[in-house]
Image (cartoon, rainbow, N blue to C red):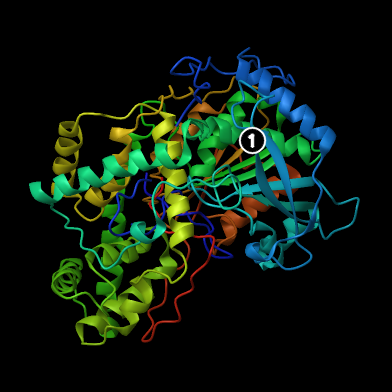
Amino acid sequence: MRAVALYGALGSLVLTALATTPAGSATPPRTPDARAASGPATEQVAGPAAARPDAVPADGTPEARGTAAAAARAAKAGIHFGRCPKTEDLPKPVECGRVSVPLDYARPDGRTISLTVSRVRASGTRQARQGALIFNPGGPGASGMQFPLYSKLDEWRPLAKAYDFVGYAPRGVGRSAPLSCQDPAQFAKAPANSPIHPDDEYKALRKDRAREYARGCSLRAGSGVRHYTSLNNARDLDVIRAALGEQKLNFVGASYGTYFGALYATLFPGHVRRMVFDSAVNPDPRQIWYRNNLDQSQAFESRWADWRRWVAKHDSVYHLGRTQQDVLRSYEKARVRIERKPAGGRVGSAQLQAAFLQVGYYDAYWARRAYALSEYLRGNAKPLTEQAAPQEGAAEAEENGNAVYTAVECNDAPWPTDWRTWDSDNTALARVAPFETWDNAWMNLPCAYWTQPRQTPLDVRTAARALPPVLILAAERDAATPYKGALELQRRLAGASLVTERRAGTHGVAGGENACVNRHFETYLLRGETPGRHAACGPRPEPRPEKAAKPERRDKRAVPKPVI
């Protein structure tokens, strides 16, 4: 699914698909992992782990035994934390280290890869400390290395007194055995156009690009690419837990992080202390990942309409139209003009759409995008160019994030391999939800041509009392991870509590602008108390219109790409 890395900017959460679609490339956003080349083509994972809190998951697979062996080694070795490399841009007192994990958990004594980890120690008293809190911001393809910096934010300070804040880069991301599928310069080529209703010639072009991108993943990463999966991300998490010296896991997963967090809960229920699932992916195996992407494209259309209604409400500021349809016509006018002549020579309709996709993720983008569109139609292209043009020096990180996204989602589950299925489904959906449908399809289309073994998604499910109480947070109008995913996750995790932000759609709600949500979040992590099966919070305040856009904040952690 197209999603963005949750918590892409300090103090706000962002989801699983990256918010920008790289031009000139097929930009892709599940779940047992594949065995080694000599093993069977598909790892069939058994049903839910047994209810008792065993040190070794009860499915009895080689991967289960391999995870236990790797965790035991990690517990003995620990993590040697020290000064962070300059490339991480993490100031003191943040420390960095590495954890070794098997590339293939079925062969724990075989090849290993090294994951980067960051930490800042709890600021409270020794008596107040509750262990390490590990965070994943989503993706697939996003890094959580900067999570320790959240300890300085007001909304997170109470938690930072009780917990060491621990971030990490999942396998394939950043310096953690990085993946690449294409020359970054080609991946981020701009300007480029991407029609919302493509003709047959354009479809043929994108099919060729997707086929080449999938081929590039195999050529550049080799056969090891098959081991970049959601199940292995869950297993890696258990090894990191052990390396930190923690008997039980405290974890906050956002967006895509909720999916492999749910896999962890299914595989290792006895290893869980507290888990927060923020903006939950629908874990139904039938949804992973093709159907989830279609649902996401449908949901973005509704959220796109929310933004247009808000802009129309403030027509006295932006002059883009008094109705949402008027605002849509203003956007389409800009899109047509940009396809003829790129804005600032760097922004085509693909970059335009990628920039405006962010209004579907976060309310924080509403005012600045409205201002940029208004100025562009008045003849001033500078604000739009500043907000939508590719970020200088970011191509390598963006291609890396996209490569991990592609590998994980393509490995995780079967995808349609007949182009006619993609064409029929997306053509029908684009008639009612044109804004994001085809760009989302192009991002995921390499999975139609994936030559690596496919996995069978794990049936996420826990038995009654097998898992400690967990907390799910969701916004009712979230587009990146539609709300029904939170309901499905709650149904599958026995005893889970769901907090809903009503009439709101920002992707990622913990530690943000809703005091009610933050109260439930903090109470759970500090005291282990949940609000019962379901609690509701009112929406956060609507953004205020601005007559001038604040400078666009480009956070290195928020790799632009669509996610779940």
Q: Is residue 394 visible?
A: yes
Q: Residue at x 68, y 33 (%)?
A: 238
**Is residue 373 shown above or below 84?**
below
For the image shown, how many numbered marks are present on the structure? 1
In the displayed structure image, the side of residue 71 where residue 193 appears, left or right: left
Q: Nearer the viewer, residue 150 or 75?
A: 75
> Residue 114: x, y in percent?
66, 42
Q: Nearer the viewer, residue 504 or 559?
A: 559
Q: Is residue 542 visible?
A: no
Which residue is at the far top? Answer: 60
Task: Quickly name the residue at label 1.
Answer: 236
**Is residue 288 shown above or below 478?**
above
In the displayed structure image, the side of residue 549 where residue 309 appears, left or right: left
Q: Residue at x 47, y 52 (%)?
A: 400
The crowd level at tag 1 (other Cα within 10 Å; few <14, some 14-19, many 20+) is: many
Q: Nearer the viewer, residue 485 or 21?
A: 21
Q: Residue at x 35, y 56 (%)?
A: 187
> Residue 292: x, y in percent?
35, 38
> Residue 434: x, y in percent?
19, 53
In the displayed structure image, the side of residue 146 where residue 35 appears, left or right: left
> Residue 307: x, y in percent?
31, 65
Which image quadrant is residue 104 in?
top right
Q: Residue at x 91, y 52 (%)?
A: 126
Q: In the rendered view of the protein, which quadrant contains the N terminus?
A: top left
**Is residue 548 shown above or below 490?**
below
Element under disc 1: helix
Q: In the rendered view of the protein, which quadrant contains the C terminus?
A: top left
Identity, as a three-letter code, of the amino acid under mark 1: Asp
